[in-house]
Image (tube, rainbow, N blue to C red):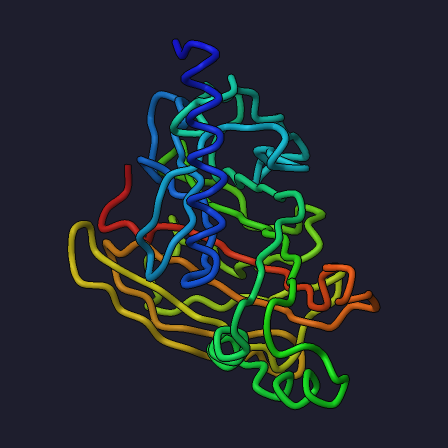
Amino acid sequence: MFTKVQLRILYVFSFLTACIVQVSAHEFWIEPTKYQINDNIINAHLRVGQEFQGMALMYNPQDFKTFKILSGSKNKKEKVKGILGDVPALNTKTKLEDLLIIYHETTDKFVNYKKFQKFKDFVSEKGYEQLIQTHLDKDFPQSNFMESYRRYAKSLITTSSASKGKDKKTGLLFEFVLDQNPYTNFDSNQISATLFYKKKPLPNNLITIFSKYKNSKLSVSNVKTDEKGKFTFETESGKEYLLDSVVIYPLKSKPDEQEPIWHSDWASTTFLVPENNL
């Protein structure tokens, strides 16, 4: 149990470090300690970092708008409850069974781009190179300007070897929905998915796919959604996957008053392709 002083220190450290990480690396995801559980106890970290590695954030209700677990087979959900300072941020026993969908929406965060090059690197990495010219056309400042951003993260886990159920919309503004249950998709080495934004399929948007075996070298690939917001990618047994995508757009604001002039929304999903059934 943390003392009040320790909690304050943890909060400040978590907040400041997350802000520092945002400038150089952007991904935010849910990382379960186990994707396949047999005791209905779920432990999962909220992580921010780069290339599927990052710091674990503590449970802090002021940092998120939504944190829930949804059944993939029934119309049931549970709120994630915790104590300020909990690490991992999700540590609960669930009454739900089979395929479970953990989903999380942060509150808005902010980053200050001291140099235009940082912004150019960011939008280029995420498939929005055209926004460099948009920035210039709008006569936005080229130093010390603000961006707001919000994260929408999902993770698929299972409590059963049969793993009934499927991924589905959770109501998040921005989310992936897998067409196949990765824990029962043993006859195929591919998974297809749809990227939804504001409840509609998002066409022609860049997806970054991170994958790794436990304690092994990371693989990274990119694909774009088609005109129906769908995409397909190869999978391998025993690998953990992180899907990541971003939407970036300008805001109507007053940069001279340090209001954010850009906003980005982030979607991520994690899951495991198991080697064997539970």
Assign the C terminus to one quadrant of the image: top left
Tell me where residue 89 appears, x and y as whole percent: 45, 29
Tell me where residue 55 appears, x and y as whole percent: 35, 43
On screen, residue 3 versus residue 165, left or right, reads: left
Say how many tags the image has. 0
Q: Quadrant of residue 91?
A: top left
Q: Residue at x 40, y 50 (%)?
A: 271
Which of the two residues, 187 or 178, is positioned nearer the viewer here?
Answer: 178
Tell me where residue 150 appears, x and y as whole percent: 63, 53
Q: Residue at x 42, y 40 (%)?
A: 157
In the image, residue 179 sits, relative to residue 214, either above or below, namely: below
Assign the N terminus to one quadrant of the image: top left
Q: Residue at x 83, y 68 (%)?
A: 252
Tell me where residue 118 appears, x and y as whole percent: 48, 73
Which of the two residues, 126 or 230, is positioned nearer the viewer here?
Answer: 126
On screen, residue 79 versus residue 208, left or right, reads: right
Which of the two residues, 155 or 123, is positioned nearer the viewer here?
Answer: 123
In the image, residue 132 sits, relative to residue 37, either above or below, namely: below
Q: Residue at x 48, y 39 (%)?
A: 99
Q: Quadrant of residue 133?
A: bottom right
On screen, residue 180 versus residue 214, left or right, reads: right
Q: Quadrant of residue 227?
A: bottom right
